[in-house]
Image: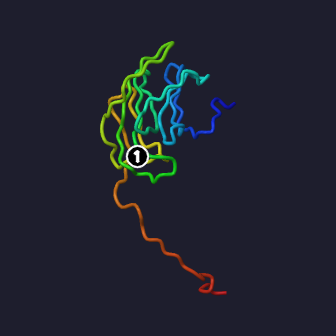
């Protein structure tokens, strides 16, 4: 069943804890931004990020939405510096959202292809994936290796 069929890219849907809203990211503005819409109708759609947004996550009580801010446009190189953002949400029959605020810079930058963070239910602690140092190792390629086999 297709819930939202548009020309724009969409990903990372997160249904709110009360099941009435869905947060997701889309390229409708020609860069990734975070939206919230009624679920499952996708009516009452509202853009909540304003300077690029990805990977929305709800606080367990549904009163706050977190997302990664970066000005990445679809196809840009990942790893750009970014910030963890927070938006107050007043759930109910009609959605009300506050102004996004910066919580802190993202360690290691934003990697749009990864689920690079998670948040505790109370919204007070975060875990991030970040590079631990040099991750590349030399690769040796052996050509014509079958010539060295004894027959």
- Can you say which quadrant of the picture contains the C terminus? bottom right
Q: Quadrant of residue 69?
A: top left
Q: At x 49% / y 47%, what residue is drawn?
A: 113
SS at mark 1 in the image? loop
Which quadrant of the figure has residue 58? Answer: top left
Residue furthest to the left: 104
**Residue 12 to residue 46: above or below:** below
Q: Residue at x 37, y 43 (%)?
A: 128
Q: Which residue is mark 1?
A: 110
Against 151, residue 139 (above or below) is above
Percent coordinates x, y for residue 61 in the rendering = 42, 20
Q: Nearer the viewer, residue 50 or 57?
A: 50
x then y, percent, for residue 93: 51, 12
- In the picture, measured across the screen, residue 146 lies left or right of residue 116, that is right
Mark 1 Cα-neighbour bin, 10 Å: few <14, some 14–19, many ≥20:
many
Q: In the displayed structure, would residue 148 be above or below residue 23?
A: below
Q: Position of residue 55 (x, y in %)?
A: 46, 38
Left/right placement of residue 102 relative to residue 115 reads left
Residue furthest to the right in view is 1
Give the quadrant of the N terminus.
Answer: top right
């Amino acid at each position: 069943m297709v819930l939202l069929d548009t020309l724009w890219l969409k990903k990372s849907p997160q249904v709110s804890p009360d099941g009435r809203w869905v947060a997701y990211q889309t390229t409708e503005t020609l860069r990734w931004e975070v939206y919230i819409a009624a679920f499952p109708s996708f009516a009452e759609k509202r853009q909540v990020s304003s300077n690029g947004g990805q990977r929305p996550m709800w606080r367990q009580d549904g009163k706050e939405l977190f997302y990664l801010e970066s000005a990445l446009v679809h196809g840009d190189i990942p790893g750009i510096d970014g910030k963890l953002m927070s938006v107050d949400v007043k759930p109910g029959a009609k959605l009300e959202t506050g102004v996004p605020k910066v919580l802190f810079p993202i360690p290691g930058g934003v990697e749009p292809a990864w689920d690079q963070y998670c948040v505790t239910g109370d919204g007070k602690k975060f875990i991030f994936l970040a590079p631990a140092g040099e991750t590349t190792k030399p690769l040796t390629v052996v050509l014509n290796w079958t010539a060295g086999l004894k027959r």
